[in-house]
Structures are given as C-alpha cells and as structure tokens.
Image: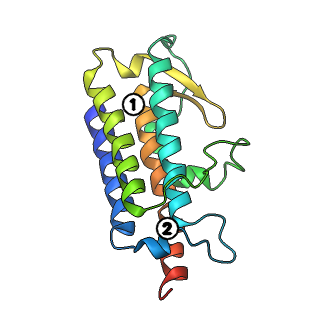
Amino acid sequence: MHTSQSALEALERSTRTFLDLVADVPDARWRLRPAGQEWSMAETVEHVVLANRSVLGALGRALAAPLADGAERLDDAAISAAMFRSAGPAPPGAGEPTGCYATRAEGVAALAAARDAIAAWANDTALDLRAHGLAHPVFGTFDGIQWILFAAAHTDNHVPQLCALREATRGT
C-alpha cells in the first residue's frame, strides 16, 4: 500500500520520464501532428497538464469528502497505465487540448508546475489522504493517495504516444 510520499515519488518518476521524451525536441517539431496521430507533442503535454490540474482540483474536493468506513475503492496496484487500455473513451471534453503551448519550454514549464502543485498540496495538508476520497467518472472511488497515483498512471499512459510522435516527426 502506497504512502503519500511513495505516491508523490511515482508522480515525479512518471513526469520525469515524460519530460525526458520532449527535452531535445525542437520547437519546429513540437506542434507537428503527423498523419494518423490524434495529437501533436504539444497537445499531448497539454492534455497531461490539464489532467493533472483536474487531479489537483479533485484532491481539494476530496478533503470535503471523508470516506465511510469500509468504502469500496480500487486496490493501489490496479492504478497503472494498464487501466486505461480497457477503460473505453474518455468523457467528452475531458482534458481536450487547445494548442496553448507554442513552445516546448512553455509546455515543459506547465507540466512541471502542475506536478509541483500536486506535491505542494499533498505535503501541505495535515489530513489523512487515505480517509478522504472522491469518485472518478470512469474508474470509481479513489482516496487522496490514489488520486496522486492516478496522475502518475495517466502520465505513464501517454508515454507510448509521445514515443510514437517522436518517431513520426524525426527528421522533420
């Protein structure tokens, strides 16, 4: 079972992996959307930023929602990138990118800031994050620590997409 610290470490690792994939991408490739790809690298990063900001909002709302004793929730081990493969489509408009990051530096800064905001929130709260939770619209109820794990898993879920985009835009 994860602690707040181990969940934050998972988020840090997933974000670092994600950011490493775009570290050397020139701005000329950043906004390219290759044929057959849903999003560009810029849009993929923006989507993850939007999702992480949504997680931060959920964490804030979770504080007002103590979980009942024995409340049903996912096992921590089930919260991984694999959970997205069988989840079906995301709810309409959920984290839909708008193309707001013109440069890689803007996207990288926004993703790092979103990660840092989640970490600051978790480190600043005195409440037991296992005792508070909120339902996710697709996956069920997550406690506070599981919301952080979800942010890491969601980021990990988009790593293969970034890898494919890097490959598809190589040499352009």
Residue at position x 44%, y 31% from top?
56
Helix, strand, or loop for circle 1?
A: helix
Question: Which quadrant would the N terminus be assigned to in this image?
Answer: top left
Of all residues, the one furthest to the front in this rendering is 102
Helix, strand, or loop for circle 2?
A: helix
Q: Is 158 or 66 nearer to us in this picture?
A: 158
Bin the neighbour count of mark 2 within 10 Å (Cα to Cα): few under 14, some 14-19, many 20 and up: many
Q: CA distance from mark 2 to mark 1?
A: 26 Å
Residue type at numbered disc 1: Ile
Q: Say which residue label 1 marks.
A: 145
Q: Is 51 or 107 nearer to us in this picture?
A: 107
Image marks 2 and 1: residues in contact by CB distance under 8 Å: no
Q: Is 122 or 31 nearer to us in this picture?
A: 31
Q: Say which residue label 2 marks.
A: 162
Position in image of residue 39 (x %, y %): 61, 63
Position in image of residue 152 (x %, y %): 42, 47
The answer to which quarter of the image holds residue 115 is top left
Residue at position x 28%, y 30% from top?
120
